[in-house]
Image: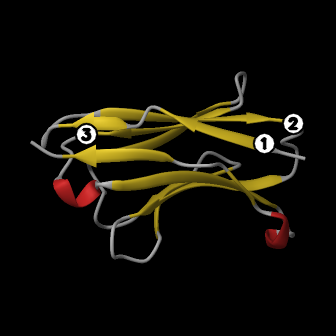
């Protein structure tokens, strides 16, 4: 069983930066990908960034060039470095872990609030 805890959210001015962390505990063998999603007010939950087991990454068009997803296998932590933040980036950011061949057993964290405002 995988347990995920996000941290690093907060209030930041437009143009600023934040780094989110998703700390995993439990057995991570067989995880196909880990993902960051965000839920913005009045909008559907959006997939922001993905990092696959082989290290490849994907990004939503809205964050390409501004956000970077990475992982540290030793600490079982996935990071989302966010730069040039815009008010539209405001939302609750959550991470998940998708098991290979068993997406129905995807595990979610509780989320962390990011607010971009002057």
Disc 1: which residue:
3
What colour-coding does the image apply?
secondary structure
Q: In terms of sequence position, does the residue under pointer 1 or pointer 2 come before the other? A: 1
At x 47%, y 71%, the residue is 45
Q: Give the camera-side residue of 100 and 118.
A: 118
**Which element is circle 2 on?**
loop
**Does residue 87 appear left or right of residue 61 in this picture?**
left
Q: Relative to 6, does residue 74 appear above or below in the rendering?
A: above
Q: Distance between the residues labelled 2 and 3?
A: 30 Å
Is the C-beta separation of discs 2 and 3 under 8 Å? no
How crowded pointer 3 is (Cα within 10 Å; few <14, some 14-19, many 20+) is rated as: some
**Which element is circle 3 on?**
loop
Is the C-beta separation of discs 1 and 2 under 8 Å? yes
Q: Relative to 64, does residue 116 appear above or below in the rendering?
A: above
Q: Where is residue 69 in the image (x, y as percent from the top left)?
A: 47, 43
Disc 3: which residue:
83
Q: Distance between the residues labelled 1 and 3?
A: 27 Å
Q: Give the camera-side residue of 24 and 40.
A: 40
At x 18%, y 35%, the residue is 16
Q: Quadrant of residue 14?
A: top left
Q: Which residue lies furthest to the top in this view?
A: 74
Q: In which quarter of the image is the C terminus?
A: top left
Q: In which quarter of the image is residue 90?
A: bottom left
Q: How far apart are marks 1 and 2 (CA)?
A: 6 Å
Q: Nearer the viewer, mark 2 or mark 3?
A: 2
At x 47%, y 52%, the residue is 93
Q: Quadrant of residue 108?
A: bottom right
């Amino acid at each position: 069983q995988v347990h995920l805890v996000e941290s690093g959210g907060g209030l930041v001015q437009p143009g600023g930066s934040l780094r989110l962390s998703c700390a995993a505990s439990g057995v991570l063998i067989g995880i196909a990908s880990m993902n960051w999603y965000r839920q913005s007010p009045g909008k559907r939950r959006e997939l922001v960034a993905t990092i696959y087991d082989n290290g490849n990454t994907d990004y939503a068009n809205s964050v390409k060039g501004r956000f970077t997803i990475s992982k540290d296998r030793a600490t079982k932590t996935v990071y989302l470095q966010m730069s040039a933040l815009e008010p539209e980036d405001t939302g609750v950011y959550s991470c998940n872990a998708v098991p290979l061949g068993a997406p129905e057993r995807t595990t979610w964290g509780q989320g962390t609030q990011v607010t971009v405002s002057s």
